[in-house]
Image (cartoon, rainbow, N blue to C red):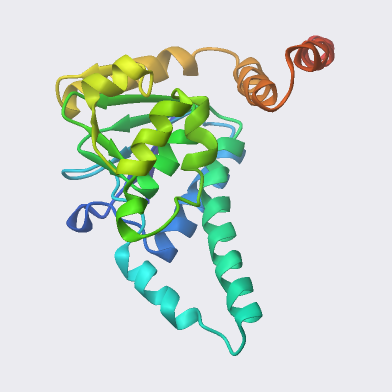
Amino acid sequence: MQTTVSNHIATLTFGAPERANALDEAAWAAMRKAFHEADVNPDVHVIVLAGEGKHFCAGMDLAVLGSLQHRMADTPEETRKQLIDFIEDIQDCISAIEQCSKPVLAAIHGGCIGGGVDIVTACDIRYCTEDAYFTVKEVDFGIVADIGTLQRLPHVLHPGMVAELAFTGRKMYGPEASAQGMVNRTFADREALMAGVMEIAVAIAAKSPRVIAGIKHNLLYKREHSTMESLGYVARFSAELLLG
């Protein structure tokens, strides 16, 4: 993963266009490390996540799925534990995006496939090109999507639409993604996408980093708590912020 920082904006870019930015185990770990580093870098106020080449991200490298056969242990219990450890480690790589205190804007072009959907659902805001598409592809490989899509996408789309996408593996293109609320806005092409997303990132980067981090924190808190619990929480949070 390539990282550049300019004007308080960190641009994190998937840099393996020759394989449609599919992620092997090292690439998943590198993504987690990049978000951890951006989180603690005081010069970074906002993050833009993008991909090089024709596609945003093709998700899990198929070689990784093939390697799972080599994780077979001596007993079913040991094999089960190794598989769970593997899945939870990849889950943690994606959760690093959500847990990062800086806002993360996904700039999506081309294919956002399988694990790519898991990744963008952990981002705070999504934008895409008109010809971009999203597909929950795991069903076609005989897999239940298990690294975040089924847990986060229902907070973005109507549950019935999530079920349709997960059951069928069909492609949702940019215009439909915008109409359904998957993305905030579509752009004509990747150049316009990056320019538009950077304009939004500049506007966010100009705000107080503490306030922006507080907004993200409270939005995530509300997702897991009732309105009344969240009102009490934000009152205490705001008081601490104002006291400084």
Whole-percent x and y of residue 214? 67, 20
| 72, 26: nearer the viewer | 72
Residue 49 appears in the rendering = no
**Which residue is at 23% across, 25% downward?**
174
Whole-percent x and y of residue 44? 51, 31
Whole-percent x and y of residue 209? 60, 20
Quadrant the C terminus occupies: top right
Whole-percent x and y of residue 11? 38, 36
**Which residue is at 16% across, 29% downward?**
131
| 45, 163: nearer the viewer | 163
In the image, taking residue 184 as reference, residue 188 lies left or right, namely: left
**Which residue is at 54% across, 12% downward?**
207
In the image, taking residue 180 as reference, residue 74 lies left or right, namely: right
In the image, taking residue 238 as reference, residue 22 lies left or right, namely: left
**Which residue is at 58% across, 52% downward?**
92
| 143, 22: nearer the viewer | 143
Which of the 4 image quadrants contains residue 13?
top left
| 25, 244: nearer the viewer | 25
Residue 54 appears in the rendering = yes
70 shown above or below 34 = below
175 shown above or below 151 = above
How many numbered circles are shown? 0
